[in-house]
Image (cartoon, grey):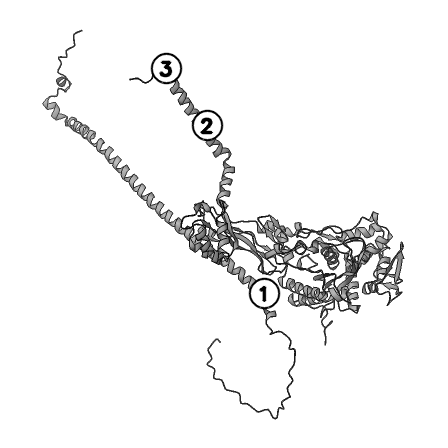
Amino acid sequence: MKLFKINPKKFNRMVKLVQLAFIVIAGLLLLQMARLQLFDFGQLKDKAFQMRTKKAQVFRGEIFDRNGLKLATDGTVYDVYAHPQYYKEEDGPEVIARLLAPILKTDIKKLKDKLSQNYSTISIAKGIDRDTVLQIRKLQISSISTPERSIRVYPQGDLASHILGYVNPDAKLAAGVEKTGSGFVENVKSKLLQKDGHGRVIFDFGTNPEEISKPIKGEKLTLTIDAAIQHVAEKELNKMIEATDAEKGTVIVMNPKNGEILAMAVSPSYNPNEYNKYDYSTVKNWVLTDVYPPGSTFKILTVASALNTGKMTPYDTVYDSGSITIQGWKIDNYDVRIHPCPGNIDLPYLLEHSSNVGSVKVALKMTPSEFHNQIAKFGIGSKTGIDLPGESSGILHPASSWDTITQATISFGYSLAATPIQMAAAVASIANDGVWVTPHVIKYPEETAEEKLTKRQVVTPETAHAMVKLLEGSVRSSKSTAGKIPNFTVAGKTGTARKPNPKGSGYLTGVVYTSFAAFFPATDPQILIMVVVDSPKGAEVWGSTVAGPVFNEVATFVTRHLNMKPDAPGLNVKK
Amino acid sequence: MPAVKYSHNYEQQSQPQHKKSEYTSFPIKKDSEKKYTHNKKSAKQINTAINFALLTFGGILTLFFIAIYSVVALSETKLANLHAKISELNYENIELENKLENVKSYYSVDNKVAATTDFDKAKNVLEVNRVDAKTTPHIEPKTNHLNTVTGF
């Protein structure tokens, strides 16, 4: 019995149509395959590679000090997750909670409530250590996973925390060299491991079993920091801050010849292993971000500017009347009561006694633009380009806006503001035959150092040499002990500047910044140390009494640690 | 149309009419005939032989590849296990290294030193009377017999 009749011609047509449809579909499939294999090949290959390498644990490169001491490395921590879809009758939330609570040192009921939540994945614990995770893994609970992840570890604790900074890969946050050196520490040269869905390694002909067993790490980063000097600088600074109940402080130790920073102690300090427990004001590197009036240390730049512009010679004198009134503003010497009118003073006297009136007279010998240009050459008012983030340019108003009193007050370090690193770099140029070099903390290979670092002649070598002599003489002749270290000649200048009122105009009463910028040996400067202590309290708070002793302690250690050849054996040695 | 009748004896016709003497004088004919029938038989055998050889070869290859695959799979599993163990050791090593670095860090050493009193200055100095050299009893030093070892 025929169920339906079909015209053979019609049938043939239908068959042909079906055939055609098949051919079209096959053609389309071929086209799609060709598109995937020929045109999207690269993109898809990359995507597949990314998916397979996603599971591979990649460590950030380690950071070392200049002598190979490890300052930052990567560790492994583990997170614990529960996956409710894999709960079994015998391994339900209650059983799991009872098993895990003692290991995770948590309350059973709380853990059970957590495990009973209606989510596809429940986070139970984060950042647990290896021993704990091994105990959990031993239990072999199928609904519990314990993936590992990298964590940045700073084995030296607080040491050089403001230089090292911190890193939070999840939030893509970083500070210090962790940020500026990410090009090194995140640069993975080794072949990335490909893993399947179960986390097993996919071996191919090119897989070297020995090679893949090594941890995948970024490049090593070596800093110019010397951990021993850094430690002593931090210790001495903290001692002084504690003794004077100061707000904050810094000690910068650098090589003036090449701009390498050997230590940058910043107080208050923090532990980068738990940086999130500190407030922003502690974590930020105020040495780069905050500005201060440099005070009398700026007289180094004032005198150098006058010598370099030819407005003064090292043998010229100026008349110091003890106090001077400019545009209605009275400027006194700090020792006006002891020396009411010193009279004609030479440059050694000006620097030794830190004469404000003398430096005003020197500064006013230059035109505002001459003085401004010279200060700008020293790098005041522009970023030094240090390889640390968050640097401030400082404050240096254009010469056109200066009136006489501005120029006068700038001469002794007011009416402008600089960061401690700007001042250190500027004074370092005097120690380096007048050549300013970018201060830096990353030790660059010689081939890249030239492009990374700037060098510029800011004063003539003759001016620089004359300044070194003047500064060495001022330290030697001074009654203060600041800068008097055994067996070495030191060239430097102390500074005490009133602290500007952060909530308005004017200055805070009785609150000062004390500083000391000096380098040694004066005959061939190799080390520059800049000390700044903010708001020390006490009866005698001066650059010479607060910053000076810190300098002496650190400098004495540096001479011993670097085994420096004394240029004045027997000098300042107690007999 | 009447069917054509073939009266020819084909067998007879097709058979070459050799004379006995002729036949014996051309024995090769007989040989070729023999050879022909022999070839027909051996082609089948060759086919069978080739098929058998191919099958055997295929079988051997399959077994060979199964064996190789098993070895490779086993080696890969072994490697994966070793890799997992090495990774575990690496993690442990990194953790221990970090702990060691922390222990020998400047601050840890400083804190440990600060915790002990070895380097503290004495708060009180105990004064004792000077002992006169003449009244000091002479104690004979003990003679130690050391068994020295070359190289130490």
Above or below — where is A3 with respect to B97?
above
Q: Secondary structure at mark 1?
A: helix
Lateral position of residue B106 relative to residue A489, left or right: left
- According to the picture, the residue beneath numbered tag 1 turns out to be B108
User: Are the residues at dot 3 and dot 1 in contact (C-beta closer than 8 Å)?
Assistant: no
- The answer to which image quadrant residue B26 occupies is top left
Q: Nearer the viewer, residue B135 or A377?
A: B135
Q: Secondary structure at mark 2?
A: helix
The answer, for residue B98, to whether it is visible in the render is: yes
Q: Nearer the viewer, mark 1 or mark 2?
A: 1
- According to the picture, the residue beneath numbered tag 3 turns out to be A9
The image shows residue A18 at horizontal and vertical percentages of: 40, 22
Q: Nearer the viewer, residue A147 or A309?
A: A147
Q: Nearer the viewer, mark 2 or mark 3?
A: 3
Q: Are marks 2 and 3 on the same chain?
A: yes
The image shows residue B6 at horizontal and vertical percentages of: 14, 12
Q: Residue A563, labelled with which disc?
A: none
Lateral position of residue A194 relative to residue A295, left or right: left
The image shows residue A134 at horizontal and vertical percentages of: 46, 56
At horizontal 65% and vertical 77% (from top left) the residue drawn is B123
- According to the picture, the residue beneath numbered tag 2 turns out to be A28
| Label 1 Cα crowd, 10 Å radius (few <14 / some 14-19 / many 20+) | some
| Label 3 Cα crowd, 10 Å radius (few <14 / some 14-19 / many 20+) | few
Instruction: Give how far apart the Cα atoms at labels 1 and 2 are.
Output: 70 Å
Instruction: Give how far apart the Cα atoms at labels 2 and 3 are.
Output: 28 Å
Q: Amino acid at mark 1?
A: Ser
